[in-house]
Image (cartoon, rainbow, N blue to C red):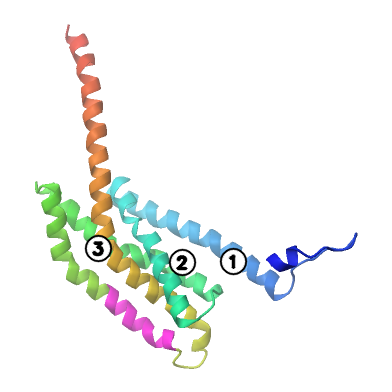
């Protein structure tokens, strides 16, 4: 496309992309909207369930990490980014957050029981490590035959499985380290905001009492 853009065309001539390329670009545009809606809906559902914007926001940090595995998976297998691969990314939005939900949900429960934050993070990581790895491994093994290309028509769906496997591996490994760090950082910021808000309210209460 960049090479075509450099061509000096005579007056009255234009270049238009039609046929398969046009259909592919339209499909990518539609899938991009679907991906955005998937992210919004996943966040909205978690916000309703948690009755908070904080925990879902932390959980959503597991989604960008999946893109590292997506790129590496396609590069290692030598497969091109296609419509089916894009569909796999949309699927991965719901799959990738599952591990972070398991970790953050248990972490919040421990803190509600009165456990100190850092101790709760360590305990949640220790207890939830096995369920997270088992869930990810089960999904990866289920997708492996499709990624290898076993069966009729498997070549068409292989990019989808490759994207899911690569994204899930990266998301699982990075989530176990990234989510606790992000949780700690944002929790510190919230504590600072609360302390500032409480300090600003103290003079107002004194004025009222006076």
Q: Position of residue 107 (x, y in %)?
A: 18, 54
Give the foreground label among 3 and 1. 3
Find out whether the residues at labels 2 and 1 contact each other: C-beta distance under 8 Å.
no
Query: Is residue 110 visible to the viewer in this orientation of the structure?
Result: no
Q: Quadrant of residue 94?
A: bottom left
- Give the extent of the magenta segment: 136-148
Query: Is residue 180 visible to the viewer in this orientation of the structure?
Result: yes
Disc 2/disc 3 C-alpha distance (Å): 22 Å
Q: Residue at x 73, y 74 (%)?
A: 19
Q: Is residue 134 above or below residue 184?
A: below
Observer-nearest residue: 126 or 79?
79
Q: Residue at x 78, y 66 (%)?
A: 16
Under tag 1, what secondary structure? helix
Q: Is residue 200 magenta?
A: no
Q: Residue at x 22, y 37 (%)?
A: 191
Q: Position of residue 174 (x, y in %)?
A: 30, 64
For the N terminus, the image quarter is bottom right
Residue denoted by label 3: 176
* Upstream in sequence: badge 2 or badge 1: 1
Find out whether the residues at labels 3 and 1 contact each other: C-beta distance under 8 Å.
no
Residue denoted by label 2: 90
* Residue furthest out toward the right: 11
* Upstream in sequence: badge 3 or badge 1: 1
On screen, residue 40 versus residue 24, left or right, reads: left
Label 2 Cα crowd, 10 Å radius (few <14 / some 14-19 / many 20+): many
Q: Is residue 137 magenta?
A: yes
Q: Position of residue 100 (x, y in %)?
A: 28, 61
Observer-nearest residue: 181 or 8?
8
């Amino acid at each position: 496309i960049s090479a075509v853009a450099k061509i000096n065309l005579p007056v009255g001539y234009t270049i238009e992309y039609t046929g398969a390329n046009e259909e592919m670009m339209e499909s990518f545009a539609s899938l991009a909207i679907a991906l955005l809606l998937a992210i919004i809906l996943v966040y909205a559902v978690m916000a309703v369930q948690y009755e908070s914007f904080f925990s879902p926001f932390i959980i959503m940090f597991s989604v960008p990490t999946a893109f590292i595995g997506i790129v590496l998976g396609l590069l290692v297998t030598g497969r091109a980014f296609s419509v089916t691969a894009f569909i796999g990314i949309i699927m991965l939005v719901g799959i990738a957050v599952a591990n972070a939900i398991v970790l953050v949900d248990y972490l919040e429960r421990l803190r509600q029981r009165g456990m100190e934050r850092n101790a709760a993070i360590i305990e949640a990581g220790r207890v939830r490590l096995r369920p997270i790895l088992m869930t990810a491994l089960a999904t990866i093994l289920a997708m492996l035959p499709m990624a290898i290309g076993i069966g009729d028509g498997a070549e068409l769906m292989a990019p989808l499985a490759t994207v899911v496997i690569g994204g899930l591996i990266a998301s699982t490994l990075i989530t176990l380290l990234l989510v606790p760090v992000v949780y700690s950082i944002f929790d510190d910021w919230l504590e600072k905001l609360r302390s500032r808000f409480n300090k600003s309210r103290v003079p107002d209460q004194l004025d009222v009492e006076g």
